């Protein structure tokens, strides 16, 4: 083996030692058994945990990539599957799948995901967060509403709550990332949401990207993807999660 081949082999070995691993896992959600994909950092841990919640398309490759990137940052990331294995290939199909998820089942699945992560020996029970995009962004907020010990939640252009009585239940720190041109979630709603949280003494950090629309972080959104805003959103996400889940 020449020196060049030896150096490359050593470099590949070093890189692989830091690579996250993934596996399909099953766990109970009420009377049902559901599946998700669990991404685990290299090393012994224990690590913070993150529930990763997909867009209205379903648990597709882009969401799995985000979960893998989070594992590379040092989190045990559970990518949940609220569609029971189905993945949409068109907006009409995505809309149909999203509308077909019963609210009580989604809440049960998200609680089950939280409980599953908390049960893992390599996960810090008091350092679990959630993140989601689009439909999943709204569900990420729902996790914060229903799990009083959730430490952090990231809402990427998801539905919001402004009822003070509901928001009072939140103990998690919140990062919100939104598009100023999002017709479904206008900036005025985002500001009202942030203001209500601050008035209640909650920890919240909200950024609105003026020229971005809905789903601006996903490169599969050919018309609306904004690379610079997406890169900034990811940078903010990494920083926020490190400050809230790794301290």
Image (spheres, grey):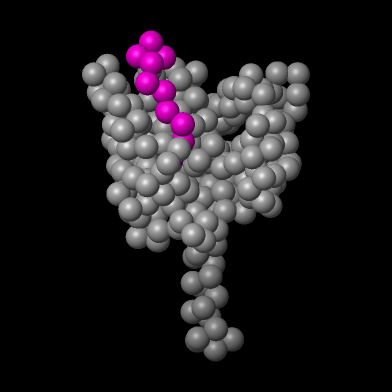
Q: Is residue 145 left or right of residue 40?
A: left
Magenta part mainly helix, strand or loop?
A: loop
> What stretch of residues is rendered in magenta?
157-166
- Which residue appears at 42% of the width and 28% of the height? 160
Q: Residue furthest right?
A: 32
Q: Is residue 24 above or below residue 188?
A: below
**x and y percent of residue 108 in the render?**
63, 21
- Which residue appears at 51% of the width and 72% of the height? 10
Q: Is residue 128 above or below residue 210?
A: above
Q: Residue furthest front?
A: 183
- Which residue appears at 39% of the width and 31% of the height? 152
**x and y percent of residue 31 in the render?**
75, 18
Q: Is residue 119 above or below residue 229?
A: above
Q: Is residue 88 left or right of residue 226?
A: right
Looking at this view, is 160 or 240 the one in front? 160
Where is the N terminus found, in terms of image quarters?
A: bottom right
Q: How many marks?
A: 0
Task: Give residue 246's quadrant in the image.
Answer: top left
Looking at this view, is 172 or 156 the one in front? 156
Looking at this view, is 94 or 125 the one in front? 94
**x and y percent of residue 61 in the render?**
62, 54
Where is the C terminus found, in terms of image quarters?
A: top left
- Which residue appears at 49% of the width and 72% of the height? 11
Q: Is residue 204 visible?
A: no
Q: Is residue 228 visible?
A: yes
**x and y percent of residue 217 in the render?**
45, 52
Give yes or no for residue 186 being in the magenta stretch.
Answer: no
Looking at this view, is 139 or 237 the one in front? 139
Q: Is residue 78 left or right of residue 180?
A: right
């Amino acid at each position: 083996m020449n020196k060049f081949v030896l150096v490359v082999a050593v470099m590949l070995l070093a890189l692989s030692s830091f690579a996250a691993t993934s596996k399909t896992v099953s766990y109970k959600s009420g009377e049902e058994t559901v599946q998700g994909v669990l991404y685990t950092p290299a090393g012994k841990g224990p690590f913070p945990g993150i529930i990763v919640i997909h867009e209205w398309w379903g648990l597709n490759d882009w969401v799995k990539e985000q979960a893998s990137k989070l594992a590379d940052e040092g989190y045990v990331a559970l990518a949940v599957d609220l569609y029971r294995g189905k993945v949409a290939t068109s907006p009409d199909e995505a809309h149909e799948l999203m509308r077909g998820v019963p609210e009580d089942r989604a809440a049960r699945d998200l609680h089950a995901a939280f409980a599953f992560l908390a049960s893992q020996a390599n996960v810090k029970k008091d350092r679990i967060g959630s993140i989601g995009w689009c439909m999943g962004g709204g569900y990420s907020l729902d996790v914060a509403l229903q799990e009083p010990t959730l430490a952090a939640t990231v809402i990427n252009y998801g539905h919001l709550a402004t009822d003070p009585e509901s928001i009072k239940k939140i103990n998690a720190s919140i990062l919100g990332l939104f598009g100023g041109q999002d017709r479904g979630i206008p900036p005025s709603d985002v500001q009202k949401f942030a203001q209500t949280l601050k008035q209640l003494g909650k920890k919240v950090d909200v950024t609105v990207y003026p020229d971005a629309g809905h789903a601006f972080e996903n490169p599969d959104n050919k018309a609306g993807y904004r690379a610079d805003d997406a890169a900034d959103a990811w940078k903010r996400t990494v920083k926020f999660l490190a400050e809230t889940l790794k301290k």
